[in-house]
Amino acid sequence: MGKMKHIVAIIIVLTVLIGGFVYLLPRLNDLPLIKGIKGSKQAATDTTAIQASANDTLSFEEKMKLALDPLEVSYSKRKKRHIWTMGGGETIITYLLQTQRFVKKAGGKVLYMEELYNNNEVFQAARVDLLKDNGDSLNIEIQVSRNEFKLGASLLAVAFQVTQLTPELLAELKKMNYPYDLLIPPFGLSDEEYRYLDKINNLNVTLWLTLESTKLNKAHNKLRPLRIHHTEEQIEAVIGDASAKFPEARGIVSRYGEQAVEHRQLLQAILKPAKDRSLWFMDISANRRSIVPQVCKELGMICKDAVAYNPENSSLDDYTKAKIREAKRNGLAVMILPLTASSIDKLSDLPEKVKAQGTTLINLSTFMKK
């Protein structure tokens, strides 16, 4: 009898709960919390729709300004044209190609393009006549500024050759606020010098391996140079040890090596294990008879050559100025200097110097990908 009373009580409670749930379910949407959740989702949807709508409301010219990013836009009554002043560092041809791509994508049509010459007011210029997406005409003169540069128009990599590390050099490196690489010999420095590297923030390490050269003697044996008489296994062991010591390294830069870069068999023995470890290779031997480009092409490997600072044929000041000009002229350059107090001091204001010409400072791995 007692059990029957419990069962009846449970049935009554379940009936009340189910009935209450059925009664409340249609009214849950009216509760403040549920309204808030639905409102948030609706607000997010509305915001996305508003942003898309706002972009759709931009005129053809406004969209074109966003795409080409001119420094200044004005109108010349004398020429009866809109004047678009573009940042230096890019050629007028580049800007014309960008214009052509935008107009086609935006539903317009280019009617006429003509490069202008003998204009002393600007570096380069061109006339462009086009139809907007609504059929109206737009006549522009694109001018490339002589004095103001588009940031990122050119790139410059900086690397320091490490032959010693001292607390003084470490303190100077910590002050540097732009990307740079340290070319580190994986063998030959003291344990204390290698430990100093752990104290450098945002460190970019590149393996600075010693290669076959007439300049090598017994004193260089501590650097474990890669020489012509070595077997492939010996060479692979050295590269493997170097890579294991600095697993964060992404590339190899030659040290000495004017004989190595002429010797196909030695080069192949060096570059194959480097490629297997996803390392790029930079030849700074300055040997005009180097066959690095050919061997790298055969191996399908990323390689480049570069000119490092040589005190025998240039001053530090002349070298750094030449490299800054090279970046501006060619769009890409690399500066390789010995790690000394004078080198670091010479580059103390480098970010300000290159920013004025639209050059961005990068590390060596970025340089190698360009």
Image: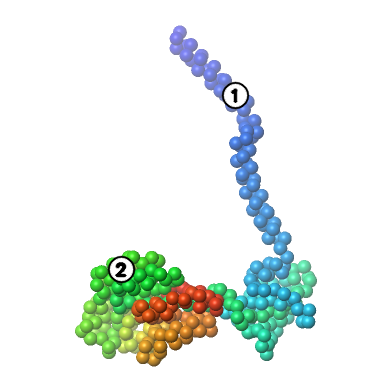
Task: In the displayed orientation, state which residue is furthest to the top.
Answer: 1
Q: In the displayed structure, would residue 55 be above or below residue 176? A: above
x, y percentage for residue 334?
44, 80
- Assess disc 1: are there few (<14), some (14-19) or many (≥20) residues with their C-alpha within 10 Å of its C-alpha: few
Q: Nearer the viewer, residue 1 or 219?
A: 219
Task: In the displayed orientation, state which residue is furthest to the left.
Answer: 218
Give the image quarter of residue 186.
bottom left
- Going 47% across and 77% down the picture, which residue do you hit? 350
Question: Which residue in the structure is indicated by mark 2?
Answer: 196
Closer to the camera: disc 2 or disc 1? Answer: 2
- Going 63% across and 84% down the picture, which residue do you hit? 123
**Residue 144 in sight from this viewpoint:** yes
x, y percentage for residue 42?
64, 45
**Can you tell which mark lies on residue 20?**
1
Amino acid found under the numbered disc labelled 2? Tyr
In this picture, residue 74 sits left or right of residue 153: right
Which image quadrant: the N terminus? top left
Amino acid found under the numbered disc labelled 1? Gly
- Going 65% across and 73% down the picture, which residue do you hit? 70
In this picture, residue 50 sits left or right of residue 250: right
**Can you tell which mark lies on residue 172?**
none
- Going 46% across and 73% down the picture, which residue do you hit? 362
The tag earlier along the polypeptide, 2 or 1, is 1
**Residue 263 in sight from this viewpoint:** no
- Assess disc 2: are there few (<14), some (14-19) or many (≥20) residues with their C-alpha within 10 Å of its C-alpha: some
Of helix, strand and loop, which one carries label 2? helix
